[in-house]
Structure formats: structure tokens, C-alpha cells
Image (tube, rainbow, N blue to C red):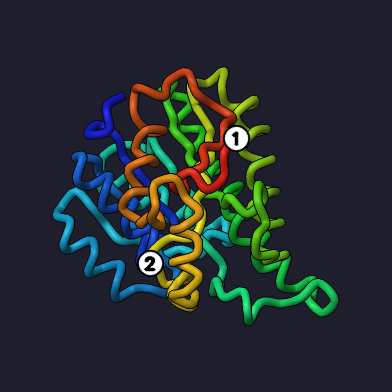
């Protein structure tokens, strides 16, 4: 299925990286569901700017009933089922290594908050959308990870552990859903210049990371979003259960 034939749900798309991903899909002609939790104003403004093939819908990804309602509303709006999921939603978080929680003091509740959004959120959207994908014999599920579980240069314990768990779910889901024509993959970025989450990162850190990458600069949200399109496109039809790192070559598999 071509991208311009797809109905794409992007979770956490009201701002930051999610907004860049939604914009990339809209540019390619897809119908796009901009999911948000609390970023109502920016999500609706984004939907208005992208045209009548987009809609902004509120739902907390940790709430299965709310996700079910979102999926049904999207089906009615676009006269068809969601074919593609990009699970990008992130618990409130700031990338600032100087202000991070240390292992000796970090509470389990911090882990739980990230696991709720990253892992439970992914499970909720997959379970809500996969039955219709199975009937179509087509589906694309793309989870957003991090290069920190490959190279934990800054030990954000809670965030990194939750994303590592999401990679495990990505691979097990790929095995279960593959026979139904559904691929499940992950794309893992590093520090992005700049999102709401990375705005707290000192400028010197951006410069340091840029100097370590072969491309000589920090990846932008728009560059990252273009890589997401690959996993939704026909050119990735034989790829599933994989984790693609998009960070300018900082981490190399």
C-alpha cells in the first residue's frame, strides 16, 4: 500500500518529534490522525495547517477505552480503518543529564510512568488497530525508541529501560502479527535538535554530539521523520522486527 493510500495514527503528535512525523506523512498524501493528550492547542493548529486529510484527536494512550474511541472516530472520519501506527507518545520528560535522577535515588514510580506510556501505550494502540489491519492483510506499526539502550552515554534509567522493553515488544509483536501481513519495527534516535524534550539540553552538549557523528551535525526531527516513512512504504515490505538507529552515525550496529 502506498503512503498516500494509508490512514496513519501518530501518537504524541501534538508537538516535537510527533508533529514532525505527522507533517512528513501529510506531505506524502496520507490521511493522518494527530493524537495528543494535553497539547490540544498545538495539535489542532497543526491539523489545521496540514489540511483536511488530517484530524487532531485527544486520547491518553494508557487508557484502552480512550484509544478504542479514538480508533472508531478516525474510522468514521476517514471512511476506513487505520493502516499505520507510529507510537511516539512520551511521558513528561526533559533530556538534561545534569538534572537527571541518579540510580541511588530514582523511585520506581518514575519507571512506571515511562512504562505506562511507552509499553502499555504501544499495547493499547496495537490491540485496538490490529484486528482491522489483519482483515486488510496489511499493517505498519512503527515504535519510536532510543539509541541510549545501545550506547547509554547519559544514564536516564527510567526512560531507557522503558524503551528497551518497547523494543522487546516490537520483536515479539512482529512474530505474532507477521502472518497477518503486519510489520512491526522500531526507529531509534539520539539527541534531536530540537524538540520540547531536548530543549533543556545545554547547547554545549549538542555541539559535542555533533562532533562525534560522521555527518557532523545533530539529527533534526524532520530528518528522523523521513526515516519513519521508509517503514511505512512498500520498500520495507520484507522488513519486520528490526530496530533502525537514526542518529547521524553516532551509534553503529
Q: Which residue is drawn at 64% across and 25% down?
A: 175
Tell me the crowding category of disc 2: few under 14, some 14 to 19, or many 20 or more residues within 10 angstroms, Cα based.
some
Q: Which residue lies furthest to the front in this view?
A: 211
Is 100 located above or below residue 192 in the figure?
below
**Residue 33 shows in this picture:** no
Where residue 113 is drawn, which disc sits there?
none
Q: Residue at x 65, y 60 (%)?
A: 153
Answer left or right for 37 relative to 76: right
Q: Where is residue 215 in the image (x, y as percent from the top left)?
A: 39, 47
Q: Position of residue 149 (x, y in %)?
A: 67, 50
Answer left or right for 216 relative to 61: left
- Asked whether 126 or 202 is in front, the reply is 202
Q: Residue furthest right?
A: 104
Q: What element carries label 1?
A: loop
Q: Tell me the quarter of the picture where residue 38 sits.
A: bottom left
Residue behind mark 2: 194
Q: Do the residues labelled 1 and 2 touch (CB within 8 Å)?
A: no
**Residue 41 shows in this picture:** yes
Residue behind mark 1: 253
Q: Residue at x 23, y 53 (%)?
A: 54
Please report whichever mark, 1 or 2, sits nearer to the chain's N-terminal start. 2
Q: Position of residue 97 (x, y in %)?
A: 62, 74
Q: Quadrant of the N terminus?
A: top left
Q: Where is residue 224 in the image (x, y as percent from the top left)?
A: 38, 48
- Asked whether 172 or 211 is in front, the reply is 211
Is 30 located above or below residue 21 in the figure?
above
Amino acid at each position: 500500500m502506498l503512503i498516500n493510500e494509508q490512514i496513519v495514527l501518530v501518537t504524541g503528535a501534538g508537538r516535537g518529534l510527533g508533529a514532525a512525523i505527522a507533517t512528513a506523512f501529510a506531505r506524502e498524501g496520507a490521511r493522518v490522525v494527530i493524537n495528543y493528550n494535553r497539547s490540544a492547542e498545538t495539535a489542532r493548529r497543526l491539523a489545521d495547517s496540514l489540511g483536511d486529510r488530517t484530524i487532531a484527536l485527544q486520547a491518553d494512550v494508557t487508557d484502552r477505552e480512550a484509544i478504542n474511541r479514538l480508533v472508531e472516530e478516525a474510522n468514521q472520519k476517514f471512511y476506513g480503518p487505520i493502516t499505520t501506527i507510529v507510537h511516539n507518545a512520551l511521558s513528561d520528560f526533559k533530556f538534561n543529564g545534569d538534572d537527571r535522577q541518579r540510580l541511588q535515588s530514582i523511585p520506581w514510580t518514575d519507571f512506571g510512568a515511562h512504562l505506562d506510556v511507552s509499553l502499555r501505550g504501544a499495547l493499547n494502540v496495537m490491540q485496538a488497530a490490529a484486528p482491522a489491519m489483519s482483515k486488510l492483510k496489511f499493517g505498519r506499526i512503527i515504535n519510536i525508541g532510543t539509541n541510549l539502550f545501545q550506547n547509554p552515554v547519559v544514564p536516564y534509567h527510567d526512560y531507557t529501560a522503558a524503551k528497551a522493553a518497547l523494543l522487546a515488544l516490537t520483536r515479539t509483536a512482529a512474530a505474532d502479527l507477521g502472518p497477518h501481513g503486519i510489520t512491526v519495527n522500531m526507529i531509534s534516535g539520539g539527541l534531536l535538535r530540537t524538540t520540547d524534550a531536548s530543549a533543556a539540553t545545554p547547547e554545549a552538549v549538542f555541539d559535542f554530539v555533533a562532533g562525534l557523528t560522521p555527518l557532523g551535525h545533530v539529527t533534526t526531527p524532520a530528518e528522523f521523520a523521513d526515516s519513519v516513512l521508509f517503514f511505512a512504504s512498500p520498500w520495507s515490505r520484507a522488513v519486520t522486527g528490526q530496530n533502525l538507529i537514526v542518529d547521524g552515525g553516532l551509534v553503529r550496529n
